[in-house]
Amino acid sequence: MKNSFKRIDAHLSTLGYCSRSEAAAFLKKHQVSSGGVRVRDVKCKVFHTNVLVDGKELDPETLTLLMNKPEGVICSHNDAGKLIYSLLPQRWQRRNPKLSTIGRLDIDTTGAILLTDDGGLNHKLTSPKSKAPKVYEAILAASLKGDEAEIFASGRLMLHGEKKPLLPAKMEVLSEKKARLEICEGKYHQVKRMFAATGNKVVALHRVSFNGCDVDDLEPAQYKLLMLHSDEYNLE
Ligand code: URA
């Protein structure tokens, strides 16, 4: 439960500062205070916003980040290879519940990805009802033919293996072999499959923004904290 009194050992462990069994040693090593009073007992009950560790406020109880995903990292907790979570500070990697990506980007796709430990927010933004807009820039192997925008906007494009056509999507030509595409659903490899359906091939894919959050100010692998909470976030 957020905003409630919790045992300091449990709370520090939830936030990834140390494990419960390491809490006694952590309290000895670090200046942990609650309401200005030094906390020395692992059983002490604290209120999140009253706690300081070495003079600093605790990390937020709910963490949501926007990252500019670099190429070569995987949006998964258990695949072989370099996982996106390895780009985060160790403490955030130890949080419980874990930070998870909101949806996924392919290993070779770069750009905007949200990570959160707010299960409600993750569910809302990945639910088929969400219609969160996702804007991509795709570099293509062959020149655009000219009918792609119409095909994508039609609401009739059926991808192989799907039961329903895709929702209408907006495409803008940026150059002969480059397009900007806005979609509001998130089917597996959707952008690559959309261009494949027109006889083309995506050779590089960058997500410019997710639900209005863009990564223009972030270098690859950089991230920033966002103040998003599922209970303040009504997508219905
Ligand atoms: N569409 C794709 O094909 N790949 C992604 O990573 C995202 C959308």
Image (cartoon, rainbow, N blue to C red):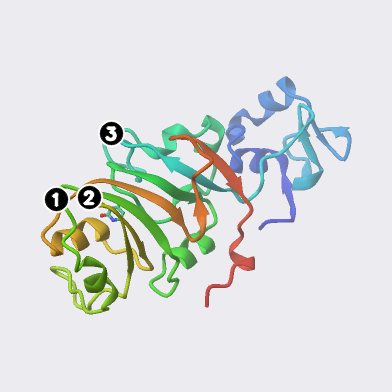
Q: Is residue 103 left or right of residue 139?
A: right
Q: Residues within 10 Å of mark 2 (few under 14, many from 20)?
A: some
CA distance for labels 3 and 2:
31 Å
- Tell which of 85 and 180 is nearer to you: 180
Which residue is rendered at x = 45% and y = 41% of the image?
68
- Residue 215 coordinates in the image, percent (x, y): 49, 45
Give the amino acid type for the residue marked by disc 1 in the picture: Ala
- Tell which of 29 and 100 is nearer to you: 100
- Residue 181 coordinates in the image, percent (x, y): 33, 60
Q: Is residue 215 left or right of residue 158?
A: right
Give the amino acid type for the residue marked by disc 2 in the picture: Lys
Tag in front: 1 or 3: 1
| Contact? badges 1 and 3 (CB < 8 Å) | no
Q: Is residue 94 visible?
A: no
- Tell which of 148 and 157 is nearer to you: 148
Q: Is residue 54 left or right of residue 63?
A: right
Q: Which residue is label 1 attached to?
A: 142
Which residue is rendered at x = 43% and y = 65% of the image?
133
| Contact? badges 1 and 2 (CB < 8 Å) | yes
Q: Earlier in the sequence, mark 1 or mark 2?
A: 1
Tag in front: 3 or 2: 2
Describe the element under mark 2 as helix, strand or loop: loop
Q: Quadrant of residue 146?
A: bottom left
CA distance for labels 1 and 3:
31 Å
Which residue is rendered at x = 59% and y = 48% of the image?
63
| Quadrant for the N terminus in the image | bottom right
- Tell which of 62 and 17 is nearer to you: 62
Question: Residue 177 — which label?
Answer: 2
Q: Which residue is label 3 attached to?
A: 81
